Every structure is written in structure tokens, then in C-alpha cells.
Image: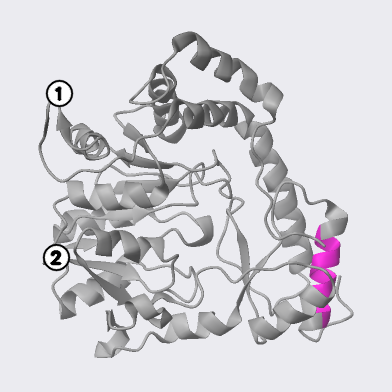
Amino acid sequence: MIPCLVPDLPPAAELLPWLQRIDENRWYTNGGPLVREFEQRLSAFIAGGDGVSCVTLASGMSALELGLLALGIGAGKRVLLPALTFPATALAVARCGAEPVLCDVSAETWAMTPSIARQALARSRVDAVVPVASFGCPLPAEEWADFASDTGVPVLADAAAALGAQKISGQVQWAFSLHATKPMGVGEGGLFVSADGALAEKVRRLANFSFEHFVACSSHGTNAKMSEYAAAVGLAQLERWPRLLQRRREVFDEYRRRLAALPQVTMQPLVAPPATLCVRLPADAAAVAAALAQSEIETRRWYLPPLHRHPAFGRVRCLGPAGSERLPVTEQLATSLLGLPFHSRLGSEDVATVVAALATAIGNPGTG
């Protein structure tokens, strides 16, 4: 079996120095020295440390939920997000007490664009927008910054899978995931990033029961802090990152070279390796997945079904194009997207095997 996704986390030998520091410090959670160092180094990793505040959290969903709460999004508020995303995006909105409102995505990028969001705003009140860096394909940061500046609607970007690839802008708040399956994974973890230091500190308080000076709760917070152990994995990952990125780039370049022989198979407009490699097929993706499984090639259908097909969100309002409630691009992608094996453990022969089997499954057996 060629597995679809294999996490690449630090081996025990590379973790040991960081674990020894935890032993020496005898500080295991509650903003310990490794967490503080990890946040400082993440700030430099993301933006060269230039005025960016990073708050590590228990999960990417925590970063979304607490980021929305810090922005004042709660009961009675409406939050626009794409229907093509992982359920955590909408679940974070719902947990804030707000109403998710779904929109369509671009046929080229498979993501909500500022233009799509502007069209939705023309039809309905929206109190916040959560664009998604789908499959780790970076969002156009400056375009979203212009949207936030022009409309006055706060933007919290769900860039869960895009840490290490996503450029940021000061007008936009950012949520990342550090789940084991992400390129910069630590096991479980999340990250809130903002150029607004006061907003970042509000998220930090919300993640620690909303304590003010460890005395009294200032609002309804939660416990979403990162432990020293997770920070240890993160610090080791940062040191491994150049090697991780180079290996992922080699696998990605091999895929691009081989998939170029299948012009009917399309990808997002990518200049760097994504978190997961999804392709749009000219045939039914479910049937192709079944054919690849017969060849012992594991695939995944991430983000599917789209949110409005989940029972939990079946009654959520959809703002489609031209005043309709249909989401035509999302519906088309729901039948044609397929996630191929993509991780650092793949060799060139594995990629060749996957693409050859894909070509056969879609009726082009002479390719590969």
C-alpha cells in the first residue's frame, strides 16, 4: 500500500535535548519557557519577527474560536465562510454562538476570494469573514487586507494547513494548525497570529480561562493552552524545517512533472508544496479512488462532502452567485476532487506508480 499521508515528526534523539530542558525547568504548562521561545521563533519564522504576535494554542480550531471571540463575534453575529472546507471552520463559528453563512469558491483556486465575499456582503449582513487556505494553498494576503480595510469587516483567515507557506498582512488575523498531519506538525496544537498585540493578548487570556492577573475571569474563557511538551516538538520541527521543506519540494516537483502529461488533471495554482495534494479529475473521483485502491494506492477526499451536505449544517444559509442559494463550483468540485499520496516518505518510483495508476483510471493508460 502507498499511504496517502504520513506525518513527519522529530525522532526521539532530536527531541531529547528539549525534553531535558523541561526536566531541568520543572515547568510543564502555563506559558513555560519553551512555549515562550517557540512563540518568539515562530514570529521570526512567519514574518521575520516584524511586529507580529504569536499565541500557541491546543488546536487550530481553538485558534479560530478564540480569534473570533476576541474580535467580538458571538451570539447574533454572522460569519461568512466557504462551503468547501474542513468542518472545524464552521464548528468554531457555531461554538462562538454565531451563525455560519456559506458561500461558493473560485473554480481556479478552490477558495473563497475577496470578490466572492464582496458579492455576499451586497446581499446580506456579515459581521466577519473567514477565508480558508484550502489544502494549504496560500491566500492572497494583501487582497484580503484591502477587503478588510475597504469594508470594515474583520477577517480571520483559516490558514490551518499553510504555516510555512502563507504570507501575512497586518489587517488580517491568522489561525494555523499544528496537527501531526500538517507540514509543521507537533501532534496537536494551533497558532493565532496578529499584528495587533492587544488582540493577541486577549486570545491568550481567553485560552487561560480569561484570568486577569491569575485572579478573576474577565469573560467566558476556556483552557486551550499549549504544553511545554508540544512546544518541545515544535522547536525541534523548526530546526528540521529546511530539510522537511526540501524533501516536500522534491516530491511536489516530481508530481508536477509527471502530471503535466495529464492535461485533463488540474491542480491549484501552486508555487510551493501544499499540505495535501488534491487534483481535479475529468471523471467521477469516487470511482477513480476505488480503482486506485485496487492498485493499493490510498487516496482521500478532504473537505467532502461540502459543509452544507453535513447534517449539522443542513439548515445553514448559503449565499450563491447571482442571488441564488446554489453553490455550483463547490458542487462540481464535490464530485471531481481527489487527494493523492503526498508526504516526505514518497520516492520518485512511488509518484510514478501513482500517476500511472491515475492515468489508467481516467482512461489514459499510455501516460506515465
Residue 142 in view in this figure: no
Q: Is residue 56 above or below residue 155?
A: above
Q: Residue at x 44, y 52 (%)?
A: 160
| The quarter of the displayed image where residue 252 is located | bottom right
Amino acid type assigned to the residue bearing label 1 in the image: His
Q: Which residue occupies the extreme top position in the image?
A: 24
Q: Is residue 56 above or below residue 118?
A: above
> At which x and y percent is residue 273?
62, 51
Indicate the secondary structure of the residue bearing disc 1. loop
**Which residue lies under the disc numbered 2?**
77
Quadrant occupied by the N terminus: bottom right
Q: Residues within 10 Å of mark 2 (few under 14, many from 20)?
A: some
> At which x and y percent is residue 109?
48, 68
Residue 55 in view in this figure: yes
Amino acid type assigned to the residue bearing label 2 in the image: Lys
- Is 2 displayed left or right of 324 in the figure? right
**Which of the numbered marks, if any, corresponds to residue 334?**
none
Residues tagged 1 and 2 counted as in contact (Cβ below 8 A): no
Mark whose residue sits in front, 1 or 2: 1
Estimate the spatial distance between the alpha carbons at disc 1 and disc 2, rounded to whole Å. 30 Å
Residue 145: in magenta span = no
Quadrant occupied by the C terminus: bottom right
Magenta stretch bounds: 351-360
Q: Residues within 10 Å of mark 1 (few under 14, many from 20)?
A: few
**Which residue lies under the disc numbered 1?**
213
